[in-house]
Amino acid sequence: MSGGVAGTFGRSTERRHRVREGRLLRGALIFGALSFLGIFLIAPLVTVFASAFAKGFGAYVTALSDPETVSAIELTLLAAGIAVPLNLVFGVAAAWLFAKYEFPGKNILLTLVDLPFSVSPVIAGLVFVLLFGAQGWLGPWLSAHDVRIIFAVPGIVLATIFVTFPMVAREVLAVMQSQGNDEEEAALTLGASGWQILFRVTLKKVRWGLLYGIILCNARAMGEFGAVSVVSGHIRGETNTMPLHVEILYNEYNFVAAFAVASLLAMLALVTLFIKKIAEWAAHARSDAAERAPLGEHSLSATVGSTPS
Amino acid sequence: MTVAVEDMTKRFGRSDGAAAVESASFSAREGEITTLLGPSGSGKSTLLRLIAGLEEPDSGRVLIAGKDVTRVSPGKRNVGFVFQSYALFRHLSVFENVAFGMRVRGRSEADVKARVEELLKLVQLSGTSARFPSQLSGGQRQRIALARALATDPAVLLLDEPFGALDARVRVELRQWLLEFQKKTKVTTVLVTHDQEEAFELSEHVVLLSEGKVVQTGTPHELYDRPKTPFVASFLGGANVLRGSVRFGMAEVGSMSVEAPAGTAEGASVHAFVRPHDIRLVKAEPEEDSVSVARVERLTRIGAQVKVSLELADGEPMTVQMSKVEVDSIGIEAGDRVLVDLREAKVFVEDYSI
């Protein structure tokens, strides 16, 4: 069996070599890609950290421990902390619905789920202002009951949920559709209840897709600017999230503080990518193992053949 | 009677669409393998899924162990289902796969352990309990799927094209293994297949389906020797079809004449089905000028058998199968002229078009 595997690998590298012919072209492509990456990705990333630490580590720490900055970080964590779990539940429920059931209007609903992706975040923010703002439809009723949504924390949370809600659903749905329904049907014939199928089979099956969806959802929730900006009102220490705070600090020429907060967001992005890579790798390792298995067929079939009655 | 289906109809999609299964009825024999045989699209898998409760019928009943289970959920029907794709839980070990049905029923750990070990021994895969499905070969996965389906002592085992995804050699071995396994366990089994060889080898009770309907039920011999419809005749054994009409009580098909069914009207159009191995060939003399002379187009050798492709006097093709020894003794070659002698033909009066 190991011989078979080695043989397969040998063949595929050979094929790759042939494709690689034309060294000049290859060199040009690599150079082009690297310079593009350097200018548009690496340089900005380095700049963020360089500017954040321009006046030393002490200044960096001082900038981050400013009460208004701490409050912005807290608000961002709060918004993500509410939006991500809600999206998790909604996303799994929606993906389950779309993957397992047929119903009239399914395609329309599926398109609507993507609306937050296709609509500009500023419009998303405005929608909430029109709904809940002082001049909005529900504004008078809300102010009569002393509930503040716009220019307050609830508005920020709502806007965050709105812009992130397709992320988990989309990821999980893609995985569910690619894996089919067989395992669920098997569980059903084995006597599992709906909840047992969900927790023992479906969620386990889609766990890497789910993790990936959560990571992306979290990254978007923490980094969202447009929609949150519209509903926030930019009240320092109250309704400023990290991205909004970065803008304010920057506009005040407080570059070290602005880049210090920005560096946190950049780190979040790096961690997100890192976890995403691990999730992909883990999912890939599984499918690799599944593909390799048929090679064992011949050596193992002997056992079947020698079956005594 | 362990499993019976009564007058089952199932349509997919729009209500005016063709039925996947139409007024199908059959019963499986207790302690034996019953095969549902038919070409793809004949509704055999749908029928199996209807028995398991994975599809809901538009009308008709399913009886398991004498009880009407048509409205009972799949998990409570007491069936074991084995999918063509195996459908093993990829995130669970072999042990947990087999244990699944008992776990969701809340059986004790000791019970589960004992039963799983017993089943793994039964399917001869005791050493694999810690492995994951992705680490097993196709044949092994299929046997684990079988063990999993049997774990809850089902009244009936339903197998949907169980060997369909395996390569030819493993398929033949596993088929033999299943036959012995079934004899040992005596579990009532309904198996779906499109492969007549598989159906004939595995069971004495074959239900033949076409376009959602049960067309004939019986032993392999009955189906083969006494086909009730042209479909059965052509589906089993790859028969040659000859067209013709009745004259003086004989069906004249192509250049030959065979006995017509009793009571067939004079002049009626008929189809005769002749199996490739029910034809005898004799080398024609050069001066022979009979209508039964055909020309040998091609000889194809498959092991000890030879497929002889003929062109009849009226230009129609015909396939004859004979042993290599026979071919050698007659001494025919491509381009030769031969006399065709039909040893047996099944004649159907027209009402059917190919």
Image (tube, coloured by chain):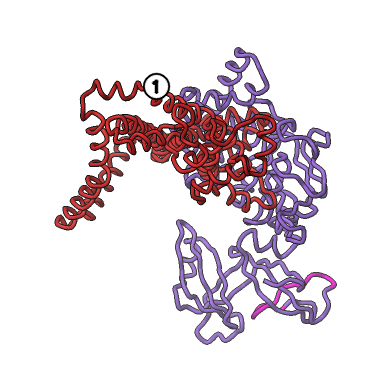
Q: Position of residue B230 (x, y in %)?
A: 71, 65
Quarter of the figure with the N terminus of chain A: top left
Q: Nearer the viewer, residue A202 or B354?
A: A202
A252 displayed left or right of B80: left
Q: Position of residue B168 (x, y in %)?
A: 48, 47
Q: Nearer the viewer, residue A204 or B116?
A: A204
Quarter of the figure with the C terminus of chain A: top right
Q: Can the viewer see residue A263 in this picture?
A: yes
Element at label 1: helix
Q: Is residue B173 magenta?
A: no
Amino acid tagged 1? Pro
First to last magenta residue range: B252-263
Please name the residue shown 23% across and 22% down the image.
A57
Q: Which chain is purple?
A: B
Please name the residue shown 37% across and 38% down the image.
A247
How packed is label 1: few (under 14 Cα within 10 Å), some, or many (20 or more)?
Answer: few
Vertical arrangement, residue A225 with respect to residue B223, above or below: above
Q: Position of residue A231 (x, y in %)?
A: 52, 39
Callout count: 1
Chain name for mark 1: A
Vertical arrangement, residue B94 with respect to residue A233, above or below: above
Vertical arrangement, residue B115 with respect to residue A296, above or below: above
Q: Nearer the viewer, residue A210 or B164?
A: A210
Q: Which residue is mark 1?
A: A67
User: In the orientation shown, which residue stands out farthest toward the top?
Assistant: B110
Q: Can the viewer see residue B184 in this picture?
A: no
Q: Is residue B261 magenta?
A: yes
Q: Position of residue B249 (x, y in %)?
A: 80, 77
Vertical arrangement, residue A35 with respect to residue A299, above or below: below
A69 displayed left or right of B215: left
Image hue for chain A: red
Res B214 → quadrant = bottom right
